[in-house]
Amino acid sequence: MRIDRLVGIALGTALFMTTAVPTATADTETVSSTAESLDRAALHATLDAVHEAGMYGGYSSVREGAERWTGASGLADVDTRRPVKPGMRHRVGSISKTFTAVAVLQQVERGRIRLDAPIGDYLPDLVEGERGRDVTVRMLLNHTSGIGDYFLGAFPSLADSSTADLDEGRFRSIRPEELVRLGLAAPATGRPGEQPGSYSNTNYVIAGLLLEKVTGQSAGTYITRNVMDRAGLRATSYPRTPYIKGPHSRMYESFYGLIDPPRDYSVYDMSWASTAGSIVSTTDDLNRFYRVLLAGGLVGPAALDEMLRTVPVTAGGVGIDYGLGIYVLDLPGCGRFWGHDGAVFGAGTIALSSRDGKRQLAMGWNLMKYQRLNEDGTALEPSAIDHAINEHIVQALCRAPESREAAAGARQPLPEGLPGADLSSGQWVTHS
């Protein structure tokens, strides 16, 4: 399997470390209500198990009604042995797409954008000709536009199984219009509106430029004021420099063993991800964001209904049910959850919430693409890290022991819905 086939949309799985990483005990914080339902010891243990399986460090926030547990386990810096802490800021990758979709839907509510209008009505010089006439705003947001991904165009060395462009592009600033040009030049993934759709970061860069066109503001400024601030997020931001402000972990990239030892990419110009994946947040803020969104605090009922209307989309070879910037995951025996996952160089994240916002998990980790290809190069080897992450998610979202057993007894605890998951071996390949 060529590396470029694994990275069509900024992939994120990894290798089980062959060298044991010394365990750092989970640092936790709890806020309790009078009713006890969170098994804090089990959450603590399953998060520690992710680190013990080989992940450098991770952090997690879990909610059950008014109860909250947040923890961290492992290392934020493998050289200095600095531990990870709850509340550390983290690049959340494609979870940014939910923020962008909310911003666009706010403009739909104000009558400035029509979901089923051709994108060429708004950006005729960007998406020209037949595509401009046939691709609608809705198709961008639910990935049925048929427009290819820009990722390999932005990092062409990956097509030759080389990560040279990752380092050469560390401080490169790339305009969103250039990302769109690369995506439009990539092979089409299908006809506009065709289902299943195909996940493409280009769609959400176009959506960001649409937002700028109708608001007269930069997308980052608009989303900060009208989504992040409105949701009451205190540690969530668009990066203005390659550096992350505030307490954060280093973020290590292995790229399936091409980078050995894994290299720190926590300092990086995120213009390559634009409105498709550049936001920085914390696990607590992500839980708050999805809770406010699903309660109708960011868009009204009609717009929220549009967000949660899903279509089949292929992401990394796996089918998911995708709405407008959000997908749904049915966890066997435990219920239905809404959210998104994301990956950028060195940082992986997932955030899931029940529809009523009462059960939530947000989790981040700081070593990416830790898996390796098998000897004949046709598949990724299974990883103990993936199993441990799944176990922590099941512990967080499945309250009753019998529900956790049902989920764990399935072929995969997360059988569908994680973009790019290789269900045959339990691997996760997530997007930027």
Image (cartoon, rainbow, N blue to C red):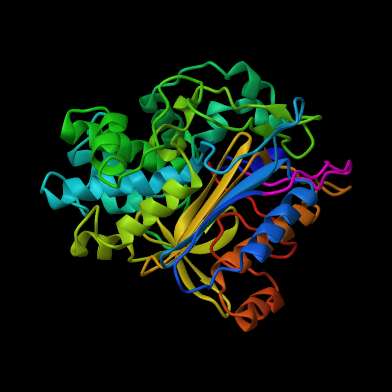
Residue at image location 57% in from the left, 19% down from the top = 169
Foreground of the two, 32 or 264? 32
Q: Is residue 167 left or right of residue 262?
A: left
Tell me the residue at 60%/57% (across/down). Answer: 317
Q: Seen from this angle, which residue lies furthest front? A: 34
Corner quadrant of residue 348:
top right
Q: Nearer the viewer, residue 399 or 255?
A: 399
Query: Residue 208, relative to residue 58: is it above or below?
Result: above
Q: Is residue 201 visible?
A: yes
Whether residue 21 is in magenta: the answer is yes
Q: How many marks?
A: 0
Image location (x, y in percent) of residue 252: 68, 33
Which span is picked out in magenta?
12-26
Q: Position of residue 18 (x, y in %)?
A: 88, 44
- Lateral position of residue 56 relative to residue 115, left or right: right
Q: Nearer the viewer, residue 196 or 35?
A: 35
Nearest the camera: 49 or 373?
Answer: 49
Q: Is residue 163 above or below residue 350?
A: above
